[in-house]
Image (cartoon, rainbow, N blue to C red):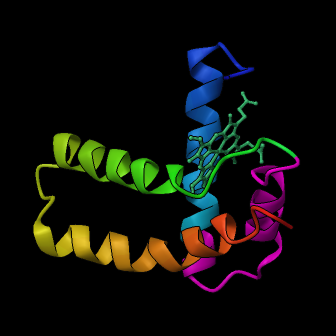
Amino acid sequence: MFRNTDMQAQKSLLRSGILVLIMHARGMPDTKVNALGKSHSRKALNVHPRHYAHWLDALMETLDRHDPEFSPTLEMAWRNTLQPIIDKISGMYED
Ligand code: HEM
């Protein structure tokens, strides 16, 4: 499934993806989020909307494991911030 087998490249993809979400949450325009919706849609990478919950859970698990200051309050803040953007991306599945 992953065309990119290099760990460093995967890390860089993940980093830029999370950055898009954060920049968008901070008020950047829709352009990059729409591009992700398009690249992950059925006709392109074909990422079914059900996979995004796992993506978000994995991100929260990673924060919990690596950030000593992580807390249920912070988790809720992350989830509340990212969910609407994720809904937008996964909502473009059939476009
Ligand atoms: C909101 C969550 C996600 C973000 C921000 C994100 C971000 C990105 C970015 C920036 C790229 C590279 C550029 C592009 O192709 O558009 C990418 C590629 C990719 N994403 Fe996602 N992604 C997300 C969720 C997912 C999920 C849930 C899956 C599958 C379970 C997935 C599978 C892939 C695959 C297979 C690629 C291609 C990788 C490659 O070319 O090596 N993504 N993603």
State the quadrant of the N terminus.
top right
- Is residue 19 or residue 94 the one in the foreground? 94
Is residue 54 shown left or right of residue 11? Answer: left
Q: Residue at x 78, y 41 (%)?
A: 45
Q: Quadrant of residue 94?
A: bottom right
Q: Quadrant of residue 72?
A: bottom left
User: Residue 71: where, in percent of width, then height?
Assistant: 11, 64
Q: Residue at x 21, y 71 (%)?
A: 74
| Residue furthest bottom as drawn | 27
Q: Residue at x 64, y 62 (%)?
A: 20
Q: Quadrant of residue 70?
A: bottom left
User: Residue 58: where, in percent of width, then height?
Assistant: 35, 44
- Is residue 44 or residue 5 the one in the foreground? 44
Is residue 76 shown left or right of residue 53? Answer: left
Q: Residue at x 52, y 55 (%)?
A: 50
Quadrant containing ligand 1 reads top right
Examine the structure image and report whether residue 54 is included in the region drawn in magenta. no
Is residue 57 shown left or right of residue 29? Answer: left
State the quadrant of the C terminus.
bottom right
Q: How many marks?
A: 0
What span is colored magenta in the figure? 23-43
> As displayed, is residue 76 above or below residue 3?
below
- Is residue 84 or residue 22 the one in the foreground? 84
User: Residue 65: where, in percent of width, then height?
Assistant: 18, 40
